[in-house]
Amino acid sequence: MNSKQRYLAAVNRQPADRPPFDLMGTACGLFDGLFKSLKAVKGITSPDRSFRKGQNVSLYNDDLLAALEIDARRVWLRQLPETEPAPDGSIVDDWGIKHEKCGGHFQQMNWPLSEAGLREIEAYSVPNISDPRRIAGLREEARRLHDEGRYAVIGRSATMGFFEIGCALRGMEQYFMDMVDETELIEALNEKILNYQMELYGLYLDACGEYLDVIETGDDYGSGTGPLISPDVFRR
């Protein structure tokens, strides 16, 4: 049983020779510092790829995955060059959110819609989805992994989670209050995010969906002790 067969057997709740190993999850892998330390322990010197910027978990290395016997490989939408770091190391992402390096981590420094009203939210520009650079080489990479047939081919989350984006734009405290006191406003924001995500996943799947075994999406709805919002609010 090879890695692909093992991974898909587990996904389909069928017997496998061992549990499949994975490192990434959705966006969850190893912090960059730990990633580099693990490479050093394994004696791996090949260059890393960065699949996103302005985040604490951003590095990918096929040699490290092989050394750890990871059973999956991922392909992801490309980031636009506009997300390159500023001279001070900060990043302004596609949504206009600034991230600054704080020690070994990045910290969000602004909430673009924290004081916005309904009209401002409706008029706020979403990231440019149609730029062809987002899918440059994506189909070829996914097809190569698919044709090799060694690993499960995973389409990594094309964007942050629905709830995460809303909190990042509005500010978590304000977003939580909006769900109770400003339902019209929060519904308009959620509709904007939803339409953006549907178009982005459509772009992704049109480019390489036929070669993927799994596509990921994810979000943060819970803490270490329970859900962040009530089931009634979640359903609404």
Image (tube, rainbow, N blue to C red):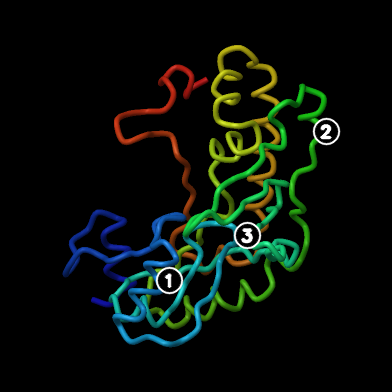
In the image, 235 versus 40, the foreground residue is 40
Give the distance between the C-alpha atoms of the residues marked 1 and 3, in whole angstroms.
16 Å
Residue displayed at 49% across by 69% down: 59
Give the distance between the C-alpha atoms of the residues marked 3 and 2, in whole angstroms.
25 Å
Query: Which of the 4 image quadrants contains residue 15?
Result: bottom left
Q: Amino acid at mark 3?
A: Tyr
Q: Amino acid at mark 1?
A: Arg
Mark 2 lies on residue? 123
Looking at the rendered structure, which numbered label has been put on residue 204? 3
Q: Which SS class for mark 1?
A: strand
Between discs 3 and 2, the one toward the N terminus: 2
Mark 1 lies on residue? 73
Horizontal side, residue 61 vs residue 18: left or right: right
- State the quadrant of the N terminus: bottom left
Horizontal side, residue 12 vs residue 133: left or right: left
How packed mark 1 is, by other alpha carbons closer than 10 Å (few <14, some 14-19, many 20 or more), is many
Task: Give coordinates of residue 68: x percent, y percent.
Answer: 29, 75
